[in-house]
């Protein structure tokens, strides 16, 4: 495998975020990751509705068809379940598919192949087959995306053994985690968020990896721990910034990966601050926030200075209209309110 | 100049006999309905850049004959479902224009209270039962509506609009198999406009595998007719509906059509390279609205005065409906929480 | 609707478990519920692979085809996604489908219709349509069911707004919850467990309902709260019984419904005992245990005398072989160990 | 006496020319392979009640010609996938008998280490690549294996066994469409035994919609041949495999067959009422194993001595394999935790 070498080489440097250097947009960072991976390994191929059309998947797959040819970058029939199975089979026989979807909602058509098949094959086969496959999708929000085009379904998959689930927040991580995901010998789901895609950030050239399964501190502070990923964490950071002048500081833990989940960083931070705000782009009930909250409850509830708080979506489908959307989604203000409530809990002895 | 998907119909050259068979008022009424849809779509398109309609749009300009031909064959009590490209079906079935525009403007009095947006129009009062933004998602649901008619002995026929790409979803074949098995009263109406977003048919389905022939192999009565010819669409759907009502089971109708605008949003996007603008221009020569207008004129059923009156009336209706929508109220926080569960 | 009347009539009595009276097996109780519902309302129909074959869905649908005719009780083509959509459409147009599956694993083929459609339609349609539909399945275990025929996927669906999720434990509840589910105007998923199906219990005749969304105490005690449903709770109760002579007593909370989740009973009990053992037949990570643990962490962590404990399945696919199965599933012994550890936590100040 | 699904083949009456075209040793080898599968299945069946094989079983007794005819047309390097009814395919492809029985006995040295059970047999060393207990689940996966062959320029052909009910799953049509679109080197081999568990075909698919004709409408080379005739199956698959290897794309082969035993477990379950025992008896008159034996005998290619020797050798092999499995070790707790993720 060419991967191992390229990886060993890259390990020394860039395992954490750089702050100076060349800037790229989030989308460009992803594009560069795909281009590098495809150049490195002829087994990597990219497919999905839009990967070779004028939209090029928000720009993520731009130029790839020209560079690597259409057998390796192709539009698909609209058959998400079938194509997921096809990717699984292709992966079992030497290829490394990167299957891109405009929206995670469309993955719901493929749960049979993801949950009943791809995630289990390595285990069921007693290690004799492996499924190195990346399923990439971008969470939609706004402009009437509505209940069927805005779902952040990472929480639905967190229980499923054998899957890896990645949610990057920065251009640096988007590239490094994409490279790690492609190099990984397991099915890896990457959930992007549309609202992060215009972000600019420092992105080293060449191949580097961000380890799957390892969180990172974005900020260090004392009053609380803010734990989450992706756009939810970005919003919480904005809220935190707005509270800085009140002297509030927090650990901001970007998990980057939801499965495997980095217990160590969660517990380290919460044990220090005694307060946890858990955020996710998905529904608050069940799923990601629930798991993180439960990890705290089963490890160190006694150190909590206040009940934990989770901020995700309410237990409602996403409404389509603009006014309702504003009310539905957490905002900087509601995040700030959650932080303040966490610091001044009502009725806590 | 590359025309991958040429128009293959005969315009209205072989349609003279329709005039003898149908009331003149009915024939001009279908024209009115098509013209109205065209003008509504144009109005939406022209205002879209103002960013007041905060919703995706999927225009049916170029596909009006399919919407109108199919829906003219349905009774009000017949049920209609469709997908993301909903405007034509909704309007042709008689859906309330104000409710639609209010929905586009995200108002509380939108046809689904600003919860569904443009991809989820419905107006139960006229049998426009629903739509899904998930491609092919409404196909089994419409099939279930037909099952309900059969088991409850209700008289309606169920109909569902689907695109060419929708037929790539396995659930469509599951639905067709079940409908044929149970002889359900349903008509699958497939608008094949050769594209799925910007991906042409040949990148998604093998050559020489016409969709309607697949449906025939699944046991459905299945035909293909010119989707730019409202008369032929009307007749095909009429006979399919009659079969369904007689208890003779489901039909599949494939209509080749062409969408003049981009997949979503305003304007043509051919310049982006996925199709030759010449292909659009070529289809525009066979405009379903003007082609039919010409036919009616030739047959002496439409003169320029009548046409002008229609235009005038439509334009007034549209102006009023936009005004209504723009002036309507936004939903409030309270509205967010209702109807999660049904009591 | 005939339902409302029949319901009003039944409300007064049987809302909680009876202890004396006619005994039925779990399967018979379900069968009686279906038969009563079909007799009461001609719109109720039953479908699924096996509902009208010699197996009659473990006996649950026995005699229904003979009694009500084959248009109302029918075998299906093997098209889970399609049939789920068909049930959704039928429900929107006046019918009340009860769609039965041998295994929850097969529901994974239908997630698009369940999650993207059935659960949301009432909301998206602004209340203009409703989807009164029951999806019933029985969790398999043992005899080589393996990774694809044993999954308890209730946790994957707990986040999804608009769904109701029911997991009965007794013949009484199986009947009462089935009747409530059929009468409910929303999509209700019922997850049975195969190992409960031979159980006998007191089951009143006629129509009665067990309310969806309300838990019940199966036992009252002081040392800990055991919270869960279905077979996992049964196992925990056995473990508890084995510890009785050591003087250990517990509140045993049978939630009966996972969504809507009965916070009140969970918090009432945990606030009293200060210790929570949370059990589920699904994976411990994510899903049901996580949600319940998190509810405690966000409400009353300060009263905990020990970190909560969850017992579910490890983060592995189900192995097929007998020896591995024994190691994979929680047992009375491992449950008992969990109880003891909860009572004597290591390193808790 | 109700025979819904009669045998419609011609037994071996029109097969004389095969003898000229193939080596005698090859023709008797196929017989050996079928006989071996029959005897293995009978042995499993006879011991099943002892509850030592704690796994579901789905016997292929009655369907041996399909397994052997198809797999004889494949090279070792060709890839094979199948569903829950795996025994025949696994054995015919050359899968290790000991590994299979150890898997049934839940031993650590089972072909998948006691993790998969009977519905998940595989032996990569002979191209038996995998199977899925989810009906139709392996169909797209096998299609992906064919995509891999095409993109990597590997020489193998992919094959997948599926049942009649599997074709009711939409994913099958998604897979076929993709395979035809990309001209993938794959053979879909559909054993139509008229039942899905106990549900007969006519309750699941409309009359007069033969499965292979649906596949043809999806753009595949598609044929139907007698699945109880190993020679005809062999020839059909051979020509499909040749097409695939030439780059001419996918084929679909439907073979009517009959399972003599219940859907799962040991013994015939016809008494339960879902089929007439007379139907089973009728098919047994066209036994794929004995019918072929008769043909070989008539052609002078098999005498009773040869047959006896085969029986003897097979019975010894089976006894040894059972002993091997029964005496093998169970897995341990450590085995439970390996291979969740692949490094
Ligand atoms: C299951 C699913 N996959 C992908 C999409 C994204 N998408 C929206 S419309 C569309 C094209 C559908 O094409 P077709 O069915 O031919 O209808 P048309 O837009 O041409 O009218 C796609 C791919 C979707 N909405 N649902
Ligand atoms: C998706 C799915 N649904 C239901 C089942 C239960 N099931 C197991 S085998 C079977 C019958 C399959 O029939 P067919 O494909 O014709 O194969 P056969 O058993 O006749 O060989 C069914 C329904 C399953 N395993 N997977
Ligand atoms: Mg289209
Ligand atoms: Mg079969």
Image (cartoon, coloured by chain):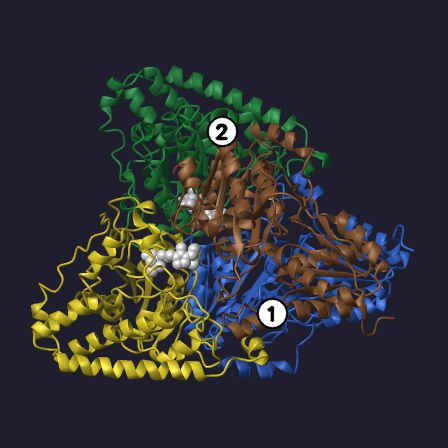
Chain colours: A blue, B green, C brown, D yellow
Helix, strand or loop under label 1: helix
Question: Which element is circle 2 on?
Answer: helix
Q: Which residue is mark 2?
A: B40
Q: Is residue B54 left or right of residue C246?
A: left
C296 relative position to B93: left or right: right
Res D147 quadrant in image: bottom left
Q: Chain of mark 1?
A: A
Distance from Cα at disc 2 to Cα at disc 1: 47 Å
Say which mark, if any, is on residue A177. 1
Q: Nearer the viewer, residue C122 or B267?
A: C122
Residue found farthest to the right: A349
Visible residue check, residue D42: yes
Location of residue B139 in the rendering, given as x and y in whole percent from the top left corner: 43, 41
Left or right: B306 with respect to A195?
left
Q: Position of residue D91 (x, y in %)?
A: 32, 74
- Could you classify mark 1 by the number of other residues whose Cα lies within 10 Å: few (under 14), some (14-19), or many (20 or more)? many
The chain carrying label 2 is B
Image disc number at residue A312 = none
């Amino acid at each position: 495998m060419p991967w191992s070498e390229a990886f060993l080489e890259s390990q020394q440097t860039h395992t954490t975020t750089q702050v100076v250097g060349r800037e790229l947009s989030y989308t460009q960072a992803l594009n560069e990751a795909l281009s590098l991976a495809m150049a490195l390994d002829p087994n990597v191929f990219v497919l999905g509705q839009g990967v070779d059309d004028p939209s090029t998947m928000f720009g993520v797959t731009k130029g790839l068809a020209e560079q690597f040819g259409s057998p390796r970058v192709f539009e698909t029939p609209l058959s998400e379940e079938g194509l997921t199975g096809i990717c699984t089979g292709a992966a079992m026989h030497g290829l490394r598919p990167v299957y891109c979807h405009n929206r995670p909602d469309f993955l719901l058509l493929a749960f049979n192949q993801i949950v009943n098949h791809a995630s289990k094959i390595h285990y069921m086969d007693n290690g004799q087959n492996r499924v190195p496959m990346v399923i990439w999708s971008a969470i939609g929000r706004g402009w009437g995306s509505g209940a069927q085009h805005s779902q952040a379904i990472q929480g639905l998959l967190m229980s499923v053994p054998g899957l890896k689930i990645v949610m990057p927040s920065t251009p640096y991580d988007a590239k490094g985690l994409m490279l790690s995901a492609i190099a990984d010998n397991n099915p890896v789901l990457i959930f992007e968020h549309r609202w992060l895609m215009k972000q600019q950030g420092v992105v080293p050239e060449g191949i580097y990896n961000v380890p799957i399964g390892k969180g990172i501190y974005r900020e260090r502070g004392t009053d609380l721990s803010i734990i989450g990923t992706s756009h939810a964490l970005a919003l919480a950071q904005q809220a935190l910034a707005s509270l800085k002048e009140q002297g509030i500081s927090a650990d901001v833990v970007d998990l980057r990966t939801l499965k495997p989940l980095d217990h160590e960083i969660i517990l380290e931070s919460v044990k220090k601050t005694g307060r946890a705000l858990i955020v996710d782009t998905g529904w608050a009930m069940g799923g990601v926030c629930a798991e993180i909250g439960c990890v705290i409850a089963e490890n160190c509830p006694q150190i909590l200075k206040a009940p934990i708080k989770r901020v995700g979506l309410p237990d409602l489908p996403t409404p389509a209209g603009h006014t309702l959307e504003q009310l539905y989604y957490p905002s900087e203000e509601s995040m700030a309110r959650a932080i303040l409530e966490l610091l001044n809990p009502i009725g806590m002895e | 100049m590359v025309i991958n998907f040429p128009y293959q119909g005969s315009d209205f050259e072989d349609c003279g006999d329709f005039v003898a068979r149908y009331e003149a008022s009915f024939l001009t009424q279908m024209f009115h309905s098509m013209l109205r849809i065209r003008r509504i779509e144009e109005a939406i398109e022209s205002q879209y850049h103002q960013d007041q309609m905060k919703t995706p749009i999927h225009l049916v300009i170029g596909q009006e004959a399919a919407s109108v031909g199919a829906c003219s064959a349905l009774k009000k009590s017949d049920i209609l479902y469709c997908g993301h490209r909903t405007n034509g079906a909704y309007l042709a079935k008689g859906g309330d224009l104000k409710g639609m525009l209010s929905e586009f403007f995200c108002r509380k009095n939108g046809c689904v209270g600003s919860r569904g947006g443009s991809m989820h129009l419905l107006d139960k009062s006229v049998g426009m039962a629903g739509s899904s933004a998930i491609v092919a998602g409404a196909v089994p649901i419409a099939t279930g509506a037909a099952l309900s008619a059969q088991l409850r002995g209700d008289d309606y026929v169920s109909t569902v609009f689907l695109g060419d790409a929708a037929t790539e979803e396995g659930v469509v074949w599951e639905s067709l198999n079940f409908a044929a098995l149970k002889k359900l009263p349903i008509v699958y109406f497939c608008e094949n406009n050769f594209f799925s977003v910007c991906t042409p048919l040949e990148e998604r389905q093998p050559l020489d595998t016409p969709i309607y022939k697949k449906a025939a192999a699944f046991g459905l009565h299945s035909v293909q007719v010119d989707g730019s010819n409202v008369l032929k669409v009307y007749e095909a759907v009429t006979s399919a509906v009659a079969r369904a009502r007689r208890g003779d089971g489901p039909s599949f109708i494939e209509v080749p059509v062409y969408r003049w605008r981009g997949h979503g949003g305003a304007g043509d996007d051919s310049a982006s390279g996925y199709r030759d603008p010449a292909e659009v221009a070529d289809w525009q020569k066979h405009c379903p609205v003007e082609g039919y207008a010409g036919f009616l004129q030739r047959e002496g059923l439409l003169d320029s005065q009548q046409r002008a009156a229609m235009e005038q009336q439509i334009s007034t209706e549209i102006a009023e409906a936009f005004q209504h929508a723009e002036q309507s109220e936004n939903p409030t926080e309270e509205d967010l929480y209702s109807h999660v569960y049904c009591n």
